[in-house]
Image (cartoon, helix red, strand yellow):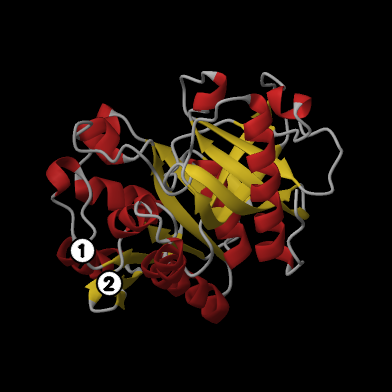
Amino acid sequence: MLRFTAIDDLARVPGPRHLALGVFDGVHLGHQAVIGQALAARRSHGGSCGVLTFDPYPIQVLFPAKAPRRLLASLDHKAEVLAAMGVDFLLALPFDRHRADQQAEDFVREIVAAGVETLAVGDDWRFGKGRLGDVALLSRLSHQLAFQLAALPPVMMDGERISSTRIRQAIRDGNLAAAAGMLGRPYTIQGKVVAGRRLGRQIGFPTANVVQGDEQFPPDGVWAVKVRADGSRLHGVANLGVRPTVDGTTRALEVHLFDFGGDLYGRVLEVEFVKHLRGELKFESLGALQEQIARDAAEAMYLLRGLNPVEP
């Protein structure tokens, strides 16, 4: 999938061009419905289908105090999800005060002038200076500028609108099943493996230290996890927290992979939190910690592989 940062870059993809517009944090089922309209237009009329979003998110620039502290997907992670859906390109426009001050109508005209023939949005989407742009404006301009407009209502689940805010809360609560239901896929986070203190290796359980980005994490503690690394799918057990037994002071994600002995430094891991095994504890000694990790690993292996637990 191609990635662009300027509207002029759209000249690099075949027309007609069909575009879904929005923030799309997490690319949940509601977002997928909007993007699906652009994909459907490509199937009907040919050309290319893309997603236009902003980086950083507008609320982080306009109202930083109100912006969510955590996101559901980094821009790179979002690009992977969109590529799997069949999207041809991602246009992530840099969002700054200049873009924020652009009149909504001028923004639409700039997009359509780039050869965009279909615009798909959520019916509550607001854009442009003062957030004055809305579906009513898009509808009027669609007749003037001869583009097709698809405005989708929100997707509901259990009587409530699916939203990124609702999904973030489910993840904070540890309700990963609810989050997966609204996302249409298991919730995962991505991070690069960096060198750590190597304490896990000293007690027989080497871990990959995964750098935490801005993505939402579930509650701290020990988790059974599934991990994807460069196309390989692995199982493991992870600790998320401050590691009080070894006098840790910052929150960290450490993943021990079963039956893996390769070098992971510098590689990006995608981690799925499958089941919370226990909260984070402080042990009296490294030996006690080692025994508990062995029990945690056996339980995680049993859950993930269907193997009989092995007594440590």
Q: Is residue 160 above or below residue 190?
A: below
Q: Position of residue 168 (x, y in %)?
A: 35, 52
Query: Which one is in front in this view, the residue at disc 1 or the one at disc 2?
Result: 2
- Residues under numbered marks 1 and 2 in contact, where contact means CB atoms less than 8 Å apart: yes
Residue beneath the point at 67% across and 18% down: 197
Question: Which residue is label 1 attached to?
Answer: 124
Q: Is residue 15 above or below residue 247?
A: below
Q: Amino acid at mark 1?
A: Asp
Question: Which residue is label 2 attached to?
Answer: 154
Who is closer to the viewer here, 215 or 237? 237
Residue beneath the point at 48% across and 47% down: 91
Who is closer to the viewer here, 158 or 146? 158
Who is closer to the viewer here, 69 or 288? 288
Instruction: Label 2: state its secondary structure.
Output: loop
Total marks placed = 2
* Left or right, residue 299 beside residue 72: right
